[in-house]
Image (cartoon, rainbow, N blue to C red):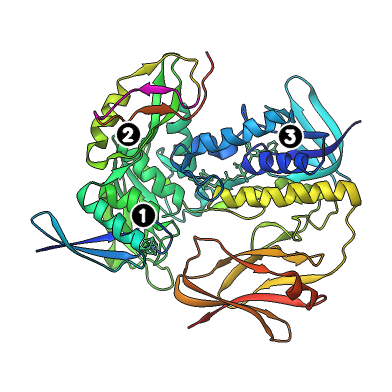
Amino acid sequence: MTKVDLVVIGGGPAGMGAAVAAYDAGVRDILVLERDVRLGGILEQCIHNGFGLHRFNEQLTGPEYAWRFEKELHARNIAYRLNTMVLDITEDKVVTAMNSEEGVFQIQAGAVILAMGCRERPRGALNTPGARPAGIYTAGTAQRYINIMGYMPGKKVVILGSGDIGLIMARRMTWEGAEVKMVLELMPYSGGLTRNIVQCLQDNNIPLLLSHTIVDIHGKDRVTGVTIAEVDENRRPKMETAQEVECDTILLSVGLLPENELTKKANVPLDRLTNGAYVDQRRMTEIPGIFACGNVLHVHDLVDYVNEEADIAGQGAAQYLKDGAEDTAKITVKPGNGVRYTLPQRISAVEKTTVFFRVTDVHKAVKVNVKNDEGTVLLSRRRPRVAPGEMETVVLTEKILAENVGKTISVELEEV
Amino acid sequence: MEQREIICTTCPMGCHVTVTMEDGKILDVKGNTCPRGDAYARQEVTDPRRVITTTIGLTDGNVLPVKSDNAVSKNRIPEFMQKIHHVAVKPPVQIGDVLIPDIDGEGNNIVATQNATA
Ligand SMILES: Cc1cc2nc3c(=O)[nH]c(=O)nc-3n(C[C@H](O)[C@H](O)[C@H](O)COP(=O)(O)OP(=O)(O)OC[C@H]3O[C@@H](n4cnc5c(N)ncnc54)[C@H](O)[C@@H]3O)c2cc1C
Ligand code: SF4
């Protein structure tokens, strides 16, 4: 069996970034496996700008951002294979993959970085009775049709879900000549960035109806319209508010799920809160030598954070290949009041660690408190505004960690 | 007197900034937390600008992502989209190549944001 020091699965920004970081930390024998015809991952279809503000201090489009990393890969002569689908990984880091030239082949990896990204929640998420006529797409599928295949999926559009991809597609389809009637959001707030609500919806006079959903879809072969209704606090439709809207296309932008089929095959334990692997501060999973980063680990809204995490995972894998993976400390990190998840979930050495977390609701003016299981407040930071759509961070210093070895640390919100 | 509410998109705070105007002149700007919000709101009420990102047709039948190299007049975007739709570019194309020079008469160009091989 072929041996490779580091196999990276997925050639999106996470995979490319991790490969580059591992190379810069001294690993030379690297192979990136990508199932698509090119590197770049989902960024290739995200043709709008706004990527890279943190990392490059520029507003790049998705393909431009991806190109920066592809050039880094080329500059280091890092090997990659396209049109290559990874089928299986074992706990012993045997990677099975397939492409049309080599057929099915196996590689014994010294370390593996999982960077398979995420996929959209399928349309099963739409809980409506009745037939399924043509004209219903996930927002990401519509994005791929328009931006890569050059094909417009419809003319009169209703979008369900106000996540960023749905908002971006509202503007994209309007600019391409479609009539986007409205964006419906089940929750009383939007999960999208304010910037996108303003520039995608307000700029184009597209109404955003909060606390609304689709209760019925009309049409036999093709969608002809939908019935929409307001929902109550328990998110149940108030049928007296029902009204019909004519449309030929429905886009669903109802959330992303990490793509962890392979992760499960390697018996890597998953966190039900993130839908990704449990990891330590180096982004190593519970299986020594298997790392994860990017959207496969938890869904990121900014690609800059994806690459920050890819750097950590790439360096972590390099360190593992050099020194192995002895834990020198054990600290558990947990979400507390008002926090949905934290990442990493575990800290295995006393070294400065940035904890990423997401809150459960929108708050103006809150305190983020970090406590240990004895109730001692270790750190307290004010935030003018937090929202579930925007990832937050707190930095745990070496001093804080050294004093809490063996304990559980929680991150929670306090109203002020 | 006229009041316009602008949501500042310069940072995630998303402050609601109220601009008071009379005969096209700005009398007052309120609600911004920092000076960047003042500048943003003034620009929005006088000359709103956006970067266009879209695709352009290639002569081989594929599409290629493009953008305007600077922010262009928001109100003229439909006109620019029309112009872009009426062009077909012959590959190869390199990222950054100017595909439509001076689309707005103000010197802003439409440039490629991806490579295309011949
Ligand atoms: C439809 C959609 C639109 C998005 N739009 C935006 C946006 O506008 N702005 C933004 O900041 N973020 C957006 N995101 C989030 C975006 O995914 C992240 O910012 C970033 O691209 C994630 O990088 P990644 O490398 O983790 O995943 P991806 O970019 O998804 O890359 C994963 C790669 O792994 C490959 N892969 C998966 N499984 C296998 C396998 N078994 N074998 C081989 N290769 C495999 C995939 O083909 C893909 O190339 C969007 C996400 C989606 C799904
Ligand atoms: S006014 Fe300042 S603080 Fe408020 S959104 Fe704009 S840049 Fe942010």
Mark 2 crowdedness (10 Å alpha carbons): few <14, some 14-19, many ≥20: some
Q: Whole-Å distance between the Cαs marked 3 and 2?
A: 36 Å
Describe residue A389's horizontal placement relative to residue A76 as left or right.
Answer: left
Residue pointed to by mark 2:
A176
Q: Is residue A409 magenta?
A: no
Q: Is residue A155 visible?
A: no
Q: Quadrant of ligand 1?
A: top right
User: Residue A215: percent from the left, percent from the top?
Assistant: 37, 57
Describe residue A243's horizontal placement relative to residue A288 as left or right.
Answer: left
Residue pointed to by mark 3:
A32
Residue in the picture at 45% in, 54% down: A163
Q: What amino acid does circle 1 point to?
A: Ile
Task: Respond whether the residues carrying marks 3 and 1 are from the same subunit.
Answer: yes
Query: Which element type, helix, strand or loop, lies under badge 3?
Result: strand
Residue in the picture at 31% in, 37% down: A175
Residue pointed to by mark 1:
A197
Query: Which element type, helix, strand or loop, lies under badge 1?
Result: helix
The chain to which mark 3 is attached is: A
The furthest residue to the front: B35
Question: Magenta segment range?
Answer: B95-105
